[in-house]
Amino acid sequence: AFTTPFLTMSRPEHVAPPEMFYAGEEAKKYATNSRMREIQTTLTERALELLALPQENSLVLDIGCGSGLSGECITEAGHCWIGCDISQDMLAVAKDMEVEGDIMVNDMGQGLPFRPACFDGAISISAIQWLCNAEGSLSNPYRRLLTFFTSLHHSLIRGGRAVLQWYPENTQQMELVTTCAMRCGFGGGLLVDYPHSTRAKKYFLVLFAGQREGAQPHQMPKAMGQEGGEKGTVDFASKRNRDKRGARSDSRGVQKHSKEWVKNKKQRQRAQGKEVPEDSKYTGRKRRPKF
């Protein structure tokens, strides 16, 4: 049982519905606030580590993709992705940032509109707690959670994983969410990184959609910051430190925003049918700072 008290500060889901809370200036913060970008990137990298995709070029679903910060990490890991979010303003920011994934408006509480077994894995960063908040008399959290998890299980390939990072409000909410996920056919459970730390503690719901034929049985990954999780802690910490020491690079070691990186991005966008300017001698050239 979890006995650690939860933070009592005002929670966004108690202020307004997500499409209203993440609107206007609040949406723009995700493109300009360096602290938010750092937190979102760190959480996404950890979620991808727990997702443990078997190879590059997997198709990943990003639930509650927002402004596309988590999608950038998916792209850098060498995977393709589709993102959905209920906030049109957040998706507009993602479009302005020219993210490489396909994005769409969707209320996850009404189900995910994808055909069966089309995703190799799914992640969600700081989103599913919104399902636990009833916005009106017709909004039933239990029903919305069942609808969401049923459609998520439906969308994943057999043996696929989903890693959902979230901020549970209390133990009752944790039990509600995990019970709904298991009732919809998922295996797995709740993983808590740094369980003894108030500030560093993070919750990840790690779910398994069945078992691939001939594959090894799923095992819950090790949590960080506790006995038996030291290896994961070292690997994850070293990755963060490496990114802080130098420029970020993609899964092929190409430095982000370099000329080669820009050309590769434009080539991928052309393959997606997007209109992209032709390459020239100025492609990828560093520009002088504006005054």
Image (cartoon, grey):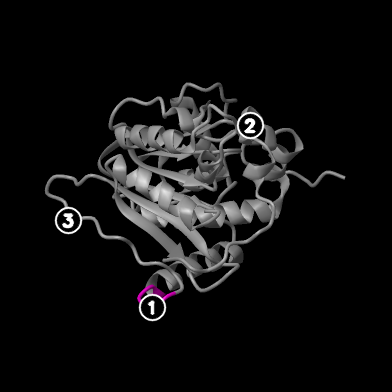
How many neighbours does mark 1 have within 10 angstroms: few (below 14), some (14-19), or many (20 or more)?
few
Residue 12 position in % (x across, y down)? 66, 45
Give how far apart the Cα atoms at labels 2 and 3 are: 41 Å
The circle on residue 19 is 2
In magenta segment, residue 257? no
Give how far apart the Cα atoms at labels 1 and 3 are: 24 Å
Q: Secondary structure at mark 3?
A: loop
Which residues, given as a range, are shown in magenta? 226-230
Q: Earlier in the sequence, mark 1 or mark 3?
A: 3
Q: Earlier in the sequence, mark 2 or mark 3?
A: 2
Task: Using the image, determine if residue 279 lies above or below residue 180.
Answer: above
| Kind of residue sitting beneath label 1 | Glu
Q: Quadrant of residue 25?
A: top right
Q: Secondary structure at mark 2?
A: helix
In magenta segment, residue 229? yes
- Along the horizontal axis of the image, is 107 left or right of 87? left
Give the residue number, with chain letter if any, for mark 1.
Answer: 227
How many neighbours does mark 2 have within 10 angstroms: few (below 14), some (14-19), or many (20 or more)?
some
Residue 142 position in % (x across, y down)? 44, 38
Give the residue number, with chain letter if any, for mark 3.
Answer: 216
Q: Quadrant of the N terminus?
A: bottom left
Tell me what residue is drawn at x 59 percent, y 58 percent.
247
